């Protein structure tokens, strides 16, 4: 199908159901989007596994496990759609080198304590809720739109769980400090989920074909519009505020800026470029190989067991 013909159909409300409905450009943009979603959902689990056993109650531990189960289910949805689109998902899962996975850089770090798990849910699942909620409202790919009904509700549950953990932690000075420490490195990390600034993008195939509805900066504003009021309501400091004149949320620090991965600390005195941020993403974070090995381990152990039996 010619590009202009497809765009005209989409403009009139056409929903694509099969590969045969797509041109090559649409197909590649859709597969790239689903790949990022699949990797992101699955690789959100290893960081949570590093601290979930520190949950202060059985109820909270069960909730953390439920969140992880949801995330694996969300990844399965994206993988299943990729399979329908002709991708070899077993190869993608088990043959890819660790640095080629497309999960957010923030997911390449172990968490230091239970409170960080809460901030992880409140900030990063909020980013997922923002991104996937936008896709749910606007995507022209029917199978994904229907699947996102479930995903949308579960991501909201995840971020609310994080808010509960943060709010309760602010009642005690020791855990309140842990909340602030976690926010100090996770706040800007969450903003990076939405990608490069709009003025650096010449065009967006995702927007053109209505795979998403809002630009990167617009989605960042959506995230800020709920994250900042929540943090302010519980007494957590964030490097951003609402500007009455522009009627937008603005940052009080350079964005992007240099990040020290070893110390998990931003250098607000050293602004960075998006080119350097992309290089950091591609270089991956400290636990990248460890976390990929963890999600692939069972597959290889089973394969070795089969070989021994044969």
Image: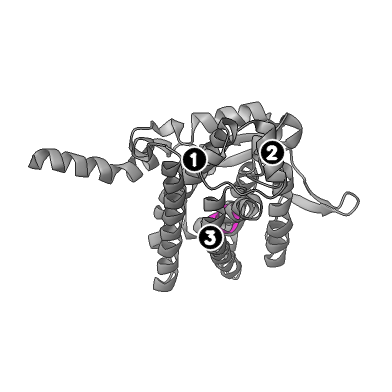
Callout 2: SS? helix
Asked if residue 50 is positioned above or below residue 171 in the image, the reply reads above
Gap in angstroms between the C-alphas marked 1 and 3: 26 Å
Measuring from the top left, give residue 133's x and y in whole percent: 62, 55
What residue span does the magenta drawing correspond to? 120-124
Callout 3: SS? helix
Q: Is residue 269 left or right of residue 37?
A: right
Asked if residue 38 is positioned above or below residue 56 in the image, the reply reads above
Q: Is residue 44 magenta?
A: no
Gap in angstroms between the C-alphas marked 2 and 3: 42 Å
Depth check, mark 2 against mark 3: the one in front is 2
Gap in angstroms between the C-alphas marked 1 and 2: 23 Å
Residue where numbered disc 3 is placed: 118
Instruction: Name which residue lies at 42% across and 72% down.
Output: 57
Q: Earlier in the sequence, mark 2 or mark 3?
A: 2
| Contact between labelled residues 2 and 1, with CB atoms less than 8 Å apart | no
- In depth, the one of 118 and 138 nearer the eye is 138
Residue 35, numbered circle? 1
What secondary structure predominates along the stretch shown in magenta?
A: helix
Q: Is residue 20 left or right of residue 191?
A: left
Q: Is residue 144 left or right of residue 91?
A: right
- In depth, the one of 189 and 79 nearer the eye is 79
Callout 1 environment at 10 Å: few (<14), some (14 to 19), or many (20+)?
Answer: many
Asked if residue 55 is positioned above or below residue 86 in the image, the reply reads below
Callout 3 environment at 10 Å: few (<14), some (14 to 19), or many (20+)?
Answer: many
């Amino acid at each position: 199908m010619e590009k202009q013909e497809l765009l005209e159909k989409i403009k009139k409300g056409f929903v694509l159901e099969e590969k045969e409905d797509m041109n090559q450009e649409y197909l590649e943009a859709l597969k790239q989007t689903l790949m990022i979603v699949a990797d992101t959902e699955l690789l959100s689990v290893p960081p949570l596994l590093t601290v979930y056993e520190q949950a202060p109650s059985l109820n909270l531990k069960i909730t953390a496990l439920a969140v992880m189960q949801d995330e694996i289910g969300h990844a399965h949805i994206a993988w299943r759609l990729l399979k329908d689109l002709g991708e070899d998902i077993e190869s993608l899962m088990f043959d890819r080198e660790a640095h080629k996975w497309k999960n957010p850089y923030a997911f390449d770090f172990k968490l230091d304590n239970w409170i960080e798990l809460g901030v992880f849910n409140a900030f990063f699942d909020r980013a997922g809720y923002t991104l996937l909620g936008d896709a749910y409202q606007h995507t022209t790919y029917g199978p994904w739109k229907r699947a996102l009904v479930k995903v949308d509700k579960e991501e909201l549950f995840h971020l609310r769980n994080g808010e509960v953990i943060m709010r309760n932690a602010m009642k005690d000075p020791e855990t309140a400090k842990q909340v602030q420490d976690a926010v100090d490195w996770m706040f800007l990390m969450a903003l990076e989920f939405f990608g490069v600034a709009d003025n650096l993008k010449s065009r967006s195939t995702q927007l053109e074909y209505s795979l998403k509805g809002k630009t990167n900066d617009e989605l960042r504003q959506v995230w800020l519009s709920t994250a900042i009021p929540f943090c302010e309501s519980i007494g957590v400091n964030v490097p951003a505020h609402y500007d009455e004149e522009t009627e937008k949320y603005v940052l009080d620090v350079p964005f992007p800026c240099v990040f020290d991965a070893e110390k998990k600390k931003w250098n607000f005195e050293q602004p960075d470029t998006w080119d350097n941020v992309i290089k950091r993403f591609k270089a991956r974070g400290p636990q990248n190989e460890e976390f990929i090995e963890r999600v692939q381990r069972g597959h290889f152990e089973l394969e070795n067991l089969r070989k021994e039996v044969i």
